Structure formats: structure tokens, C-alpha cells
Image (cartoon, helix red, strand yellow):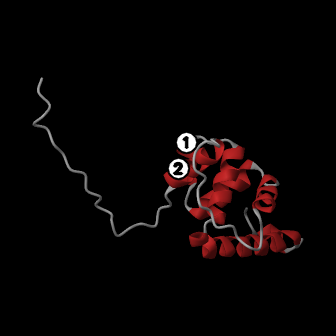
Amino acid sequence: MNLENISFFLEDKNKEEESEIDLSQLINEFNLLKNPNLKKPNIEINKDKNIQEIETDLKSYNLNELYKIVEYYGLLKNIKIAKYKKTEIVFIIKMFELNEENKLIVEKRKKLWFYLNEIMKDKIMKKYVIW
């Protein structure tokens, strides 16, 4: 069988819609961090919090709360497909939050989570929130 005559072209039909997060890039950075022989990725660290503080904050969440964060960032579909464990989800969220390009959505998520926690502390208002 001669395969030299076969050729194909791939074209992305949704070039304008680039709102989906590139999870493969996060996974590659994760793999690079796991293997010390490979070149470390260039990650800009947020000046307000260092990596350990972010990781400590995220480890206090249970798996359902982490899924809510991941869903807010638009990564839930990819995370569920890959069936990641809690530590891997924490790492992916940490890498997402450390990326300078995601600064606005991270700040917005943290602000909204703060508001939600404040509402949940109120005895009267918490009965009106399904979370």
C-alpha cells in the first residue's frame, strides 16, 4: 500500500473564539516542574502572594469547592475528562492564578468568593443562597 499520495490539511474553524483556556500548556508546565532535568517554565509570580500561600489557600478547599473554582475559570470540562486528583487540580489552579494574563479573572473570582462567604456567615441571608 502506497501512502505517499495521501495529504490532508487541518484548519481551525473557530479562530475568532479563543476564550477557552489552553489546558495543555498548564499540563506541560506541570510536567516540566515534575522533571528537574527539563527547563523550568517562565512563570511570573504575583507580588501579593507567593506560591506557598496560594497552595495553602487552595488545600483548605474540598474537591467540590475546587471544581467550582475550576468551573469559574473555564477549565472544568478538561479537568473532568482527564480525571485529575485533588493535588493536580490544586496545581492547575495555582498555575492559572500565577499567570499574569489571568490576573483580572482571578481577582474577580476572589472578590466574589469573599462576598459569598460574607453572605453565608449571615444567619438570615444564607438561607437564600444555594451553594
104 sits to left or right of 131: left
Tell me if label 1 and label 2 are in contact, CB under 8 Å.
yes
Q: Which residue is identified by label 2?
A: 78
> Residue 117: x and y, percent?
81, 69
Image point (25%, 56%), residue name: 11
Q: Secondary structure at mark 2?
A: helix
Amino acid, disc 1: Ala
Q: Secondary structure at mark 1?
A: helix
Q: Which residue is identified by label 1?
A: 82
Amino acid, disc 2: Asn
Image point (66%, 65%), residue name: 98
24 sits to left or right of 2: right
> Residue 40: x and y, percent?
61, 52
Quarter holding residue 52: bottom right
> Residue 5: x and y, percent?
10, 37
Image point (87%, 74%), residue name: 124
Above or below, 21 against 10 in this view is below
Instruction: Please tell me which residue lies in front, 5 or 88.
Output: 5
